[in-house]
Image: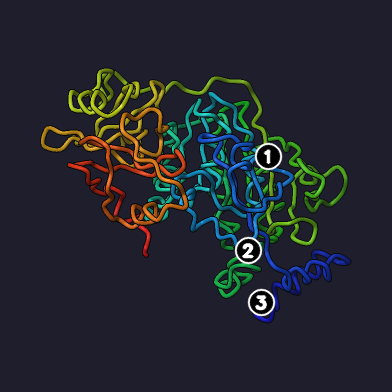
Amino acid sequence: MSDLPQAFVQRMQSLLGDDFAAFMATYEQERSYGLRVNTLKLTVADFRRLAPWQLQPIPWCPTGFYYDAADQPGKHPWHAAGLYYLQDPSAMAVAELAAPQPGENVLDLCAAPGGKATHLASLMQEQGLLVANEIHPGRAKILAENLERWGTKRALVTSAAPDTLAAHFGAWFDCVVVDAPCSGEGMFRKDAEARAEWSEANVMACAARQDAILEAAYALLKPGGRLVYSTCTFAVEENEAAVERLLARFPDLEVGSAHLHPAWQPGLASDEADPVRLTARLWPHRLQGEGHFLALLYKAGNGEAPSQLLQTESKIYTAADKELQAFAAEVLYELPPGPYLRFGNKVFQVMPTTPVLDGLRLLRPGWPLGEVRKGRFIPDHSLALGLRAEQVQRCHNLAASDPDVISYLSGQTLATDLPNGWAIVCVDGFPLGWGKVTRGVLKNHYPKGLRWRR
């Protein structure tokens, strides 16, 4: 690869020594491709039975598989139904190391585009609360769309600076994940833009930004909680040195072992006693995946997080609006349980233990159910993707090979024999979105911004 920055090559030669030639050879090799199964919608065994592709397990992620680039699963209707997420195999290591437990409060601090957030949501099994944050509004919108397609109900999406979140929540989270913005050296094999933008000055600027993010992450972590820090770069300044700077500022942090798999190499340490040896590096010449760095840290103590629940005078309420009740009676077999939250005309299902969110920029305060317009309830796309086909009274089910699937995803109307009213359009039994039937014609309600180009 001729466009690698020369200063980067020299740095890597100094860093790797005898491994340098093997490392450089990876730039002449094809990158690996991975997908991760959405266990909120189906089991891994069922997916493997249904999938038309040759899949090979990713050894550090039980739900992850390598696939051949020629298969193009991103262009399959199952992707629109949220049955899997396309993700670099090394990136799947982050949530596996975080290992969120059902019932925990978890923060993904730099969450866009949503790969790690969807992974965390699956591991939490819809028990507990996931806050997925992204400071840049445009990227936060993409994050919300990916969580929508994933069908998770227990995820909030915020768009705030890390220090703003720290001031708002305090030490509230059991687990904080920081997949930090970085110089992107680990992505050079697949990202020409990252190669073009690299400089040693940018490495130092990224390290300074990471220090500020980690300081906020520490403040958000409750005593006894754990912090997972990751980057997709090889730069020591952004990896082991970032951990060392964090430990110097906060001596009540302790480094835990990030060595979940034998292919993950120890962090670059000064000696055997150096705690950064417990961090992990994922080198592309030692495994199938791009470059990554991982660190696991624990905050001393066993204290309780501050109680910041919704107050009685807030917008939360127990009974559903009559419009939602009427919609559910006509369309669903059961009303999604409350409590509910109203933002303007929009209705969300929330958890009783949702923290106070006033003052934060929110893209998603709960599971979006729909909107009340002129006395009628209009269901949200998120509601469709969070339901199962058997929960809806009218389902227009199509096989993935049926041309009508592409027609629907492209925004076309469909012919149907369903009775009049709202219906779910499904592919192989998995919801894709809403349609409204009138006299044998299903009017398309697939969101315009998501429609496929034919």
Look at the image and tell me in which quarter the N terminus lies: bottom right
- The residue where tag 2 is placed is 187
Q: Is residue 232 visible?
A: no
Q: For the residues carrying marks 3 and 1, which lies nearer the camera in this image? A: 1
Query: Label 3 belongs to which residue?
Result: 5
In the picture, residue 73 is in which quadrant? bottom right
Rendered image: mark on residue 62? 1
Report how far apart the C-alphas of labels 3 and 2 lie in the structure. Answer: 13 Å
Q: Position of residue 361 (x, y in %)?
A: 33, 43
Q: Is residue 73 visible?
A: yes
Considering only vertical position in the picture, is 350 above or below 141?
Answer: above
Using the rendered view, name the quadrant where residue 254 is placed. top right
Q: Earlier in the sequence, mark 3 or mark 1?
A: 3
Instruction: Say which amino acid is labelled 2.
Output: Met
What residue appears at the point 68 percent right and 64 percent down from the top-left corner?
31
Please give the name of the residue rendered at 83% of the width and 67% of the height, measured from the top-left corner: 22
Q: Nearer the viewer, residue 376 or 126?
A: 376
